[in-house]
Image (cartoon, coloured by chain):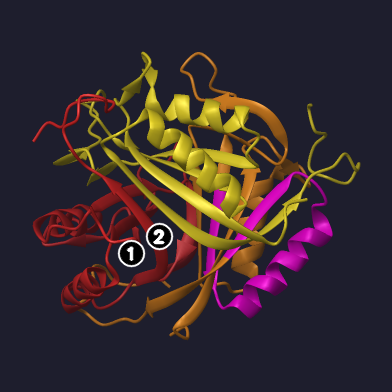
Chain colours: A red, B yellow, C orange
């Protein structure tokens, strides 16, 4: 179980941002997994603007390939997230907007039979 | 109107997690509604990993039925959210990752004619 | 670059809320852009309830036009976000739920060649 005092790191990228020929958000989640962070969730926005563009991007049926804003949410201790963010910054030097905030973390893992489903690992 | 000092509770589940034969996120929102919480929003991630799995789940057109990560965001007072989380924990014993954080809440309800639309209730 | 001490403002609206004949979330993002806020992201929920309705709205294939919950996330200094929220409140008087919280902001803009893509502006 994570300690109660944790942090939430949110990294804002564009859907079409690439790093090493893969989507940047995929690369970030893969690295977060490799470094053993507690949780990662990628959310896609319908509309937005940010660090990398001042144009407002909007999801419209006729323009599916727009560069929509993405938010990657990472949960762990402040220390692990700071280390992770420093790692990301070594690779990505522009176009990033990130926020870090303190949160109380409740983390329940286990293989008790009362949970919503068995853990697959 | 809610007091200014509120909290945000975020519960991370998998899209295919079930409780009492319904999606777990649906059960949580229904319970939140029944307990009169101020607001609930369910967001679906495109990709992620978390408490219940160390596999990275990704949304791909060819695999619509993946177990995508979901975030349920609940807003109310810290006290009501703690009570709600304790209630959820009585039912769900594993696979949950939750964060709680303090936020300033601005809540405007009413039936003034100047709002964006009339309240349906 | 933004100062390290920033804030995150989250405004919860319904997908079908309108202001001046356009979707309310579009109007908010457009105004945020016009006022030079650092970042805005609109997320659409699959399900939820909130300030404007006590009915739970759910995304179902057969009911694409449901009034789904939307979250607009805005990042900047607390001062700029307070000014922006006051501006929004002058126009929208009901049906809004908003939260404000302090976050550490890391903002990288620039045109270095090492970023994930060139800035389009």
Question: Residue C5's spot in the image, x, y percent?
Answer: 49, 82
User: At 78% from the left edge and 43% from the top edge, which residue is drawn?
Assistant: B116
User: At 88% from the left edge and 39% from the top edge, which residue is drawn?
Assistant: B111
Q: Earlier in the sequence, mark 1 or mark 2?
A: 1
Proximity of marks 1 and 2: CB atoms separated by less than 8 Å: yes
The magenta span reads C71-100
User: At 54% from the left edge and 25% from the top edge, which residue is drawn?
Assistant: B30
Name the one closer to the observer, A59 or B101: B101
> What is the CA distance from the residue labelled 1 to the residue labelled 2?
6 Å
- Corner quadrant of residue B86: top left
| Vertical order, A40 against A6 (above or below) | above
Q: Chain of mark 1?
A: A
Badge 1 density bin: few <14, some 14–19, many ≥20, Cα 10 Å: many
Element at badge 1? strand
Residue C91 lies in the magenta-colored region? yes
The answer to whether residue B74 of the structure is visible from this angle is no
The verdict on a common chain for dots 1 and 2 is yes
List the residue tagged with mark 2. A104
The answer to whether residue A81 of the structure is visible from this angle is yes
List the residue tagged with mark 1. A6
Horizontally, residue C101 falls left or right of residue A79, namely: right
């Amino acid at each position: 179980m994570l300690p109660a005092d944790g942090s939430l790191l949110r990294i804002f990228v564009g859907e079409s941002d690439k790093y090493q020929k893969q989507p940047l958000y995929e690369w970030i989640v893969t690295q977060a997994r490799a470094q053993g962070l507690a949780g990662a969730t990628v959310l896609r926005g319908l509309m937005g603007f940010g660090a990398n563009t001042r144009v407002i991007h909007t999801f419209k049926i006729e323009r599916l390939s727009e560069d929509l804003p993405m938010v990657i949410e990472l949960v762990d201790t402040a220390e692990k997230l700071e280390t992770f963010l420093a790692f990301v910054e070594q690779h990505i030097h522009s176009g990033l907007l990130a926020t870090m905030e303190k949160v109380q973390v409740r983390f329940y893992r286990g293989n008790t039979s009362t949970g919503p489903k068995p853990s697959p690992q």
